Each structure stands twice: as C-alpha cells, then as structure tokens.
Amino acid sequence: MIEILTNTYQLWEPPLDGNPDRQVELDMGCGKGRFTLALAERYPERLILGSDVMIGRLRRLEAKVKRSGLSNVRLLRAESLTLAAFQLSPQSLDRLHLLCPDPWPKRRHRVRRLVCTDFLCRLPRILKPGGALHLSTDHELYFADWLELFDKMPHFHAAPEAMADIVDVKTDFELQWNAEGKIVQHLCFRLQ
Ligand SMILES: C[S@@+](CC[C@H](N)C(=O)[O-])C[C@H]1O[C@@H](n2cnc3c(N)ncnc32)[C@H](O)[C@@H]1O
C-alpha cells in the first residue's frame, strides 16, 4: 500500500477504480495519520492519500489502515515539494490538507518552510479547478506569514466553507498542541 516516490522522477496517478468522478484528497505530511484515517472513515467512497518522508511513520500508519479494514487509503513516501512539482499527476486532487507543517521557528531555518511562493505556485498543477487547500498551524508567526502570502496569490481565494465538514477532525499534532493549551489556527482556500 506504500508507494515509494522519494528520489524518483516517477509520475504517480491516483487509482480511481473506474470512477473518473471519484474524489481524491491528500493529507500531506500525514505523520502518524490520525487525520488520514478519520477522513477515510468519514468518506469511504473517496480516495484518501497520506504522504510523508518518514517511512517508519508510514509503516505504522499502514498497519493501522490494515487493522481498520479501510480500502480507500494509499500512502506515499514522498517529499512534499517534489510531489507537488512533478510526481503527482496533473489536476488529481479535490482537496489538499497541509496540517501542522514544521514551522522552522529559527530565523536561519526559515528557508526550509514548505509554505512559500514556490510551493503555492505549484499547487494549481495538482489541484483540480476549484480544488481546495486546507492549512493549519499553532505557530503564530508562520500563520501571520501565510496571511500575507495568500494576499499576494491571486489564484487562491478564501473558502472557509471548504473545510466546514472536517472542523471536528484533529491531527495528532493538533491534539498535542491543544493539550498544552496552544491554539491551532486553520485556513482554507480554493483555486480560482
Ligand atoms: C509536525 S509533523 C505534522 C504531522 C501531522 N500532519 C499532524 O498534524 O499530526 C510534520 C510532518 O511532515 C513531515 N515532513 C516534514 N518535511 C517534509 C517534507 N519535506 N516532505 C514530506 N514530509 C515532510 C514530517 O515527517 C512529519 O511527519
């Protein structure tokens, strides 16, 4: 069930099982995969993808998927920017979730942040027209940067309604931050 895409130029096409209208969602940087599993349980007719670079986390998540009996999950070992840049087939996603990505708080590490103009400009390649991007973070400065960045991205417009169906579903990190008294803020946009 785990597709290894890291360090390959492979183009990966989500399996639609004969239904071209099948909705596809990606939990990018899925970690332990609580959100991936919850989404797959809620929407058994949809294909739910979870991607991460950490193969150990993916193997543990794969075991959880098997135990749950869910047949609509595929896991990708892939680097997020590379996945968006060329590994996922064009216009393959209805919704992309990027939840609690590493905030890289130290100034000298900021270049490692995934949410930047380069990444955002690659998303129209993999999102379907009208597709949604759902983000969250507990990091106030990263969140403030996102607001500034999206203000300058004419191809995305704010669409909080596009995450209304899953506001109750929390990731492992969101639960952890909440337990420490931290607030996790969410944003959602649609492609024009
Ligand atoms: C802070 S954790 C959040 C995990 C999960 N989304 C959650 O909220 O519980 C960030 C995850 O992103 C993965 N990750 C970090 N950089 C990545 C990259 N460049 N490509 C793919 N995955 C990455 C990490 O391995 C980790 O599982």
Image (spheres, rainbow, N blue to C red):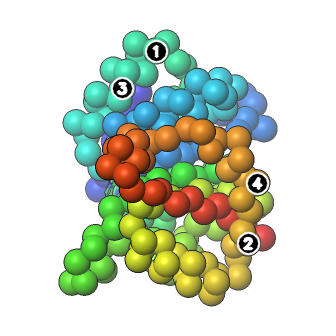
Distance in Å between CA atoms under marks 1 and 2: 36 Å
Q: Is residue 168 left or right of residue 81?
A: right
Find disc 2 in the rendering and name its residue. 157
First in residue order: circle 4 vs circle 3: 3
- Depth check: give the residue in front, 78 or 130: 130
Label 3 belongs to which residue?
62
Dot placed on the residue nearer the N-terminal end, 1 or 3 = 3
Q: Secondary structure at mark 3?
A: helix
Graded by Cα atoms within 10 Å as few (under 14), some (14 to 19) or many (20 or more), the crowding at tag 1 reads few
Task: Point out the frontmost of discs 1 and 3.
Answer: 1
Q: Amino acid at mark 1?
A: Ser
Q: Callout 4: few (<14), some (14-19), or many (20+) C-alpha neighbours within 10 Å?
A: few
Which residue has dot 4 on it? 161
Residue 174 appears in view: yes
Q: Is residue 3 visible?
A: no
Give the mark nearest the N terminus, 1 or 2.
1
